[in-house]
Amino acid sequence: MFLTDEQQRILNGEKGETMAKVMKTMVMYGDAFEAEKLVPISSKYNHLVTSFGLKVMSPVYDLMQKLLDAEVVSGQKFSVDPRPLDKKVPANFLQNFVFNKFMYTKQDFYEDQLEKLGLMDKDAFTCACYMDEVGNKPEKGEILSWAESSAVVYANSVLGARCNRNSGILDIMGSIVGYVPYFGLLTDEGRKATWVIKIETTKKPEAQLLGSAIGMKVMEDVPYVIGLDKWIGNELNDEACTYLKDFGAATASNGAVGLYHIENLTPEAVEKGKDLIVEGAKEYVIDDAELERVKNNYPVVWKNPDAKPKLCFMGCPHMSLQQLKDWTDKVEASLKEAGNKKVLIPTVFTAAPKVLEAFNKTDYAKRLEATGVITSYICPLMYMNNPLCKKMPVITSSNKLRTYTSARYYTDDEILNAITKGGK
């Protein structure tokens, strides 16, 4: 790997032993992927994936403390993934006991470390840091050092920033030293599509289901999607961005997609069109039958497949402000139609603290509260990591949550029917 004079001096210890180790880490990371050089991070803020104070993560806390003791802190302020706990979210005595005594015992300690390292503010905890309310939205072409998969794929695809799917800890290492290895999705060649996906459905495909199908087919490759603009338009407005947020999270979790192109919609597809597609690209046609096949093949891991759901999570990744408003309307209307006043299943809508703050200033907040739906900043995945919560029959329309936990996937319409009318 070629290093500039400045990079070599850092590696040689000019800025201290700790910074030299950070630089060595990034060089070794780059060598593993045959990167030719390191390039400067150009975004204003970073985003870290490790947000939870798990008791077993003592090596992380030791590492962070060594950085702090050496006064080697992030070169950027940063946001971080969601907190794992919220007292508003239903949990029984034993579940809470496990959460507080055996799992997230270091949460306060770790958050204090994060603040000292460069946390944007005390509420900068969300997997959807690119929301306008949060304030960490990179510009087109900016180089990032992120690791959260759903945020990386959104930044690359919808915003046109450049970021590889880094791992946790490497995200802050890049931010500290100010450089990341140049390979993969940072390069023009690495951003070309090796798959052409043709959407031939008779109706607007469910975002999380479509993303799941594509992710499982292409895995870590870059897909170029044709025909989706028919259903979501050719303008990156709130509705389209919300759709792509959920779509992308599913491609990244059900596969390992870090970038997708939507014809006539996403920035690079608008600029370069089919020139983004490599010669000999593979093809995948998705119609109604294919989406149904994918959905029907999801494993049901509940002990009793016919169990009555005890909890519903919406918002993995975190919901947008418009999603909260739209779902308030839908829940109200469906409850009224069924003759019910409150949801029949405990239901939690999750969103970034700053998004919830904005939502709570609208009349929608009290309307949603009246339906019995709980709003929270929690990470549903971290909640479901509790072994006692894993045993619960939990439903969700998030294919990310389904993939990583025992939660069961339903479409948005099925979720609405279940929580307001008791149907399946």
Image: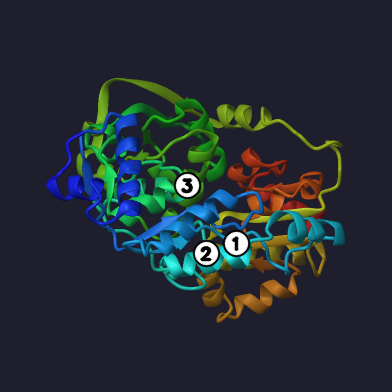
Q: Earlier in the sequence, mark 3 or mark 1?
A: 1
The residue labelled by disc 1 is 83
Q: Earlier in the sequence, mark 3 or mark 2?
A: 2
Q: Does dot 1 land on a helix, a strand or a loop?
A: loop
Q: Is residue 338 above or below residue 286?
A: below
> Relative to 211, is 406 on the left or the right?
right
Real-space Cα distance between discs 3 and 2? 15 Å
> Relative to 350, is 28 on the left or the right?
left
Residue 156: x %, y % from top left: 34, 46
Residue 54 vs residue 249, the one in the foreground? 54
Residue 231: x %, y % from top left: 44, 45
Q: Does dot 3 land on a helix, a strand or a loop?
A: loop
Q: Are marks 2 and 1 in contact (CB under 8 Å)?
A: yes
Real-space Cα distance between discs 3 and 1? 16 Å
Q: Is residue 110 above or below residue 233?
A: below
- Amino acid found under the numbered disc labelled 2: Phe
Disc marking residue 125: 2
The residue labelled by disc 3 is 168
Residue 279: x %, y % from top left: 25, 20
> Relative to 245, is 4 on the left or the right?
left
Residue 191 vs residue 229, the one in the foreground? 191
- Amino acid found under the numbered disc labelled 1: Arg
At horizontal 33% and vertical 63% (from top left) the residue drawn is: 76
